[in-house]
Image (cartoon, helix red, strand yellow):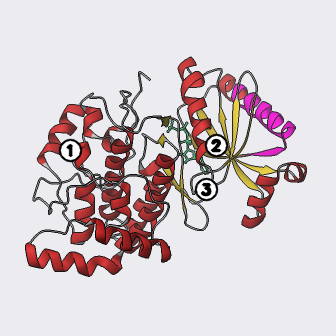
Amino acid sequence: MKSCAKREADKKTFMEQVHESKENGYLLSSRKIGSGAFSKVYLGYATQEKLRQNYKLASDLRSKRHSMVAIKIISTAKAPLEYSRKFLPREIYSLNATYKHINIQLYEMYRNNRRTYLVLELASRGDLLEHINATSDRRECPGLEEEEARRLFRQIVSAVAHCHNVGIVHRDLKCENILLDERGFIKLTDFGFANRYSLKNSLMSTFCGSVAYTAPEILMSKKYNGELADLWSLGVILYAMVTGKLPFKERQPHKMIQMIKQGLSFRQPISPECQNLIQGLLQLKPGARLGLQQVATHCWMLPATSAIFHQALKATGRPPELSPALEKPLRLFAARSGELGQASRGSRQGNQSPCRPSRLPCTGRLPRPSRNGSQGP
Ligand SMILES: Nc1ncnc2c1ncn2[C@@H]1O[C@H](COP(=O)(O)OP(=O)(O)OP(=O)(O)O)[C@@H](O)[C@H]1O
């Protein structure tokens, strides 16, 4: 139980935050909507005066017909220096560099020597993890229906492609960092581990994110390509969406590697197209993973093309490789029909091997994995 002194101190801090927010044009409510390692996120409201001053904020909130925002308060005085000097600036840079897409918009920032305030677009329907668990409970069947998973995954792929196109790798893609707004659109968030890269093939060495979503090359402490590591995480997210479970779950990285090497299994009926896409992303070798363009034009993402998949499967016993000749019209078709978001640059030849029979996945509801620390650049 909190001591009386602690409660008083918390109350004083909150009142200071209310005051500092008001000075900057926002009314801070006492409704806490989330918290992170060094931050608390509150529901806030833009004042009329603020709306008159900030055109971007005003036009966005007008389209939403409310004045609510999420105010993320980071207590820089309490956070480690490394966080304030390295990760927070990266988060702000990434939010600014990618805001024109479907990730969370950073409307504004204000700060003093104790705290930094990020005024963010409100995503009022919680995170993807909560959504998967709630839907699983309602359906009495783990996971989302493939149709819904497809709708959400297309948006996620499009958001990640947008990040990669502007030279940003997220490095902490997981269901908890994908929020849903009131219209059911996804909002990519938590760019605390995001990083810039200037050379497409430059390698990184920082261990970021959560073990369950982390690419094996990072778990093995190898230098890694951030884009390819994001692709692995996308495979874990898709698996989690359609099965309601994590594909591999171990606390210890070396045990995770063993599990990954034993391969994937699907214990419930998932369409062969979807299994094929997940397999294409969850490739042990980073270079063998499907590229974002291949993901966006995969037959599971474009159901109209699944006849081709089935014909090839029937004729050869193998799913088809997308030939360059087929890829272009599919992309055009996808773009026209709105099935494809912004395409990422570059296309890798992914390994589209048929599904391997393998070990059992973890069971039960999707847990919230704990985050790893991070060292290095
Ligand atoms: N824009 C938003 N709208 C609604 N809720 C939000 C928003 N941003 C953050 N949250 C909520 O607050 C929680 C913490 O936010 P966020 O993940 O950005 O903080 P963090 O300090 O980076 O967290 P962590 O230490 O877990 O990485 C989120 O999980 C989410 O539930």
Which residue is disc 1 drawn over? Answer: 284
Report if the beta carbon of the residue with label 3 is closer than 8 angstroms to ligand 1.
yes
Is residue 25 on the magenta stretch? yes
In the image, residue 17 lies at what x, y percent?
76, 34
Label 2, secondary structure: give it. Answer: helix
The rendered magenta stretch, by its main secondary structure, is classed as: helix
Q: Comparing marks 1 and 3, which lies closer to the viewer?
A: 1
Mark 2 vs 3, N-terminal side: 2
Which residue is disc 2 drawn over? Answer: 96
Give the residue type that dot 1 points to.
Answer: Leu
Instruction: Report how far apart the C-alphas of labels 2 and 1 lie in the structure.
Output: 33 Å
Give the residue type that dot 3 points to.
Answer: Ala
Q: Residue at the spot x=37%, y=59% of the render?
A: 293
Instruction: Report how far apart the C-alphas of labels 1 and 3 lie in the structure.
Output: 34 Å
Snapshot quadrant of residue 73: top right
In the image, residue 299 lies at what x, y percent?
30, 71
> Which one is nearer the viewer's eye here, 6 or 206?
206
Is residue 368 depicted above or below 150 in this figure?
Answer: above
Label 3, secondary structure: give it. Answer: loop
> Which one is nearer the viewer's eye here, 122 or 287?
287
Which stretch appears magenta?
A: 9-29
Is residue 118 depicted above or below 269 in this figure?
Answer: above
Number of callouts? 3
Q: Residue at the spot x=18%, y=35% of the render?
A: 255
Snapshot quadrant of residue 259: top left
- Mark 1 vs 3: CB contact within 8 A: no
- Mark 2 vs 1: CB contact within 8 A: no
